[in-house]
Amino acid sequence: MNPPREKWVAIAGVAVLGLIAVAGFAIAIWAAWLFHDMPDAGDLADYHPPTATRAYAWDGTLIGEFSRERRIFVPYDAIPPQLAQAFLAAEDRNFFKHSGLDYAGIVRASAKDIVNIAQGRRLESGSTITQQVAKNILLTNDATIGRKLKEALIAQQLDRTLPKERILELYLNEIWLGYRSYGVGAAAYNYFGKSITDLDLAQSAYLASLPKGPDNYHPVRRKAQAMARRNWVLDQMAEAGWVTRAQANAAKQEDLVVQPEPTRAKYRDADYFVEEVRRRGLATLGPRLNEGGYYMRTTLDPRLQSAARTALMDGLERYDRRHGWRGAWGHVATLAGWEDVAKKSARPAERRTWRQAVVTQVAGGTVHVTTIEGQTGTLAAEDVAWARAGKGIGTGDLIFVAPDDAGGPALRLKQVPAVNGALVAMDPDSGRVLAMVGGYSFSLSSFNRATQAMRQPGSAFKPIVYATALENGYTPASVVMDAPISLPGANGQTWTPENYEHDYLGPLQLRKGLELSRNTMTVRLAQGVGMPKISASAIRLGVVTKMENVLAMALGAGETTVFKLTAAYSSFVNGGRKIEPHLIELVQDREGKTIFKAETRDCDRCSNGFDGDESPRIPVSGSQVWDPITAYQITSMLQGVVQRGTAAAASVLGRPTGGKTGTTSEFRSAWFVGFTPHLVVGTYIGFDDNRSLGNGETGARAAVPIFIDFMTQANKSFAPDDFKPPANAKYAMVRGIREAFRPGTEPRVADVVVDTAGGAQPYNKVFQNGLTGAPNAASAVQPATPPKKPDEVNGLY
């Protein structure tokens, strides 16, 4: 018998109620899961969007920016009303009227979303500016119903928590606008090269057109769509009454013109320096560097930096040219479409006048070329001869050409040097790095040879040997033998260092040995002083972190960097103090609070202003690593290197200058570290694979000309001062040269000469140390341990 109908109805009712309860429970669980980690809108009260740290040279030139998101934060009060109204017209006209949600807009978007869901399309936005702030800062970009619900709830919280002006400020500074730009401040600068206060109506409307999709309205690739969208924004502004119809129509007639793809800074000669600043900034500040919006003042002098880049590039090209034409960097079988092939090879970005070109015809002694821009011309006759003496040149060859610097009608043939190098310039008193170039072209190789390339300095290390000797009983009048020397080594081998010239000059004073860079004399001196003391000096100066106590190290067989050795030379110029070379002087946060300062010295009376009494006395920075008299003695000897020695070419500078050349065995590296009272400059040339530079490519030939070129420009900024002598030094004429001595060590006539390999030998009427028991190294000779690679230290110069 069938149950009565009422019973089935009751059963169905219970089932429906159960389903409703289950559904309700499921919805409650889903809602609890969805909203359990919902952000608090109140967190945005003190929120600051990530902004770029901007690095400046000492004169205020912007040289770089560090950020994940390129943004310039602009407070609400600094945003022009016209720009804000453009965004309101495009995105949320009722922003100041609704409570975070625009219900009419939601209804319109929801109706479209029904179709979108059915067709598998992305959901419509329909979002207010408040919702976009919630999504951009607190949520993800997931196009899901759950995220849209969160967005709506947070938007309402935001509207209750924050003033409308603060919400709009967050939006205009957070929004992605393309062209490497987050926020309106960066966008105005990147698109138009302007501050937001200088934007006109059409430009403001264009920026407001971008939030819906910057790529869709790219100002170059999709210019027509971009202008159409901009004009729509202008119409919306007119409709809202924020501009007149006449103003909107006038703005529509304006062309959309933007600057080329933005770069980090207008000043482009400091790429290696800026990258080193970034690396050191990360080490000091950590990830905050890329989001903290810091102001960073560096030590860079833009004028010196530009001079350094030009001097190094010119010097590397000179070296490269004298070693011959290596041939075209590409070749095409047919001239049709050669431009597409040529575009694949990048020219050095730093050589802005160079152009890719193709050889179209070779007739007799004339080579015809066409540049990638369509310019036609012929190569200079001397370049044709240079190319033919090398790998040759023919039709279809792809080459680089540039206008003649002398203004001639012919084009000059160019090739990118295979060799590389570095130049560092420092203030010897403060350690401020005024210029740094780490290679021929940062665009071709970002490896910084000034700070990252470990190389043997050769004879550029010798001043440290001589300074250590002067600290340990020797004087400028001491005499050491320059003669052949063979020393026993491990495994029965014999190490026989040689002079570069393969000659020997007999007994020489310390000055002459350093001026002429005598290897055998330096080895004898190192024997007398003891390598442990020399190694300790190099470590104390920061040239190396450790050094083997073998005599080869006295000839520069240990590895260091241009940066470290240049800093070490500063101690000779500044009176014997060790400096801490630095690139970053000051870092301040967005409120102007100093969070890093390189200057650590205290000045008790500096903050109170000058009251007419005694001026503040600031303590000298840096630990004393040499006696001031030792430092001056080495400075004087190194002046002799320029006046009479291996760097005599630098005497053309016509002012007090010192320095030391360095050339490693087999001519693998060429160095010169030179200085004036105001500047210490290290230069280096070498291949990245450390192969030979070629016979005769010494520091004097390859590196000194770069120093001269740089200092010719740098000296224009400094007075031609002389080196300051220490107050307590004593002076005496030795072989016609005025030498400085420690009190009590002034020379007197003696009849012996110190030979550190064989004790005292007769030598009539030479000036010798006036101390009782002049340094006779016969009793101090240590076992002569040869270098691990004896071939690498023969012939250092």
Image (spheres, grey):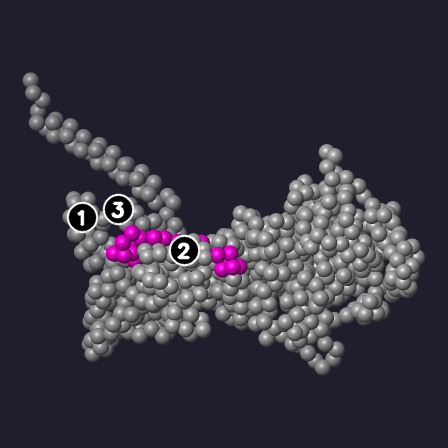
Quadrant housing the N terminus: top left
**Could you say where residue 435 lies in the image, as x and y percent from the top left?**
56, 64
Whether residue 722 appears in this view of the structure is yes
Circles 3 and 1 in contact, beta carbons < 8 Å: no
- Residue beneath disc 1: 116
Circles 1 and 2 in contact, beta carbons < 8 Å: no
The residue shown at (67%, 66%) is 648
| Residue 349 colored in magenta in the image | no
The residue shown at (31%, 50%) is 141
Q: Quick check: 598 above or below 196?
A: above
Q: Nearer the viewer, residue 792 or 436?
A: 792
- Residue beneath disc 3: 145
Please, what secondary structure does the residue beneath circle 1 have?
helix
- Horizontally, residue 632 falls left or right of residue 675, namely right
Magenta span of residues: 319-342
- Horizontally, residue 308 falls left or right of residue 609, namely left
Q: Amino acid at mark 1?
A: Asn
Q: Amino acid at mark 3?
A: Ile
Label number found at residue 392: 2
Quadrant housing the C terminus: bottom right
- Locate residue 585: give its quadrant: bottom right
Distance CA(mark 1)–CA(mark 2): 65 Å
Question: Which numbered disc, 3 or 1, marks the residue closer to the eye?
Answer: 1
